[in-house]
Amino acid sequence: MLKQQDYFLSFEPRKTIRKYVSGESHFYLGRQYQLILIDSDEKTVKNIGGKIEIRTHNFDNAEKLLEAWYLNKSKKWFHNIAEPLINQFKKYQVEPKKIEIRKMQNRWGSCSTKGRILLNPELIKAPKACIEYVIIHELCHLVHRDHTKAFFDLQQKEFPEWKKWKNKLEVLLA
């Protein structure tokens, strides 16, 4: 039982405490970027070269601005990444009813019994292959509800390098 709990805990996102100050590093699609805060009447976040630039007059807003930027980017990227994977799974006569992005404390993704897939926007910090791994994992749940041998066989068949990317996700966003 403890081994199974440890296994499921390994899927949980970990929260690194951030200060949201210039010079701090943040991830986006698996790459590390330096945060730059610029005093400005604008309220914008931009990815410029190796930096994520936040322009605001009130630096206390930096966290909210960056989180909103991550959410916006995750909406764009996750659907683009998911589309070919969903098509890949149509051969099993399954398709998610909906893909939603929702902040979750303890999961990278989930799949409801009604076929709705939820993805954590924190995934946008990980490399594309890590995002693919989570999406494929949830798509496998449309075929096999539980983590049975058949589930893992399907995951292995559809994404042979899943263990590598699962481990990368755990290490990168620890």
Image (cartoon, helix red, strand yellow):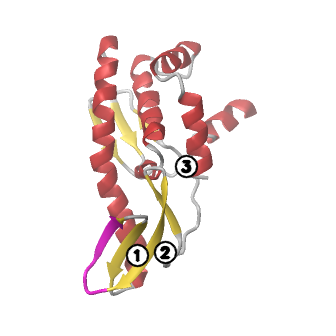
Amino acid type, residue under disc 3 in the picture: Pro
- The magenta-colored residue range is 40-47
* Sequence-earlier tag: 2 or 3: 3
Above/below status of 123 relative to 111: below
Amino acid type, residue under disc 1 in the picture: Ala
Disc marking residue 62: 1
Above/below status of 133 relative to 42: above
Disc marking residue 13: 3
Q: What residue do we see at 37% from left, 58% from top? A: 70
Q: Are marks 2 and 1 in contact (CB under 8 Å)?
A: yes
Disc marking residue 20: 2
Task: Find numbered disc 1 in the image and state the secondary structure of the residue it sits on.
Answer: helix
* Sequence-earlier tag: 3 or 1: 3
- Extreme residue toward the front, this view: 49
Q: Are marks 2 and 3 in contact (CB under 8 Å)?
A: no
Amino acid type, residue under disc 2 in the picture: Tyr
Task: Find numbered disc 2 in the image and state the secondary structure of the residue it sits on.
Answer: loop
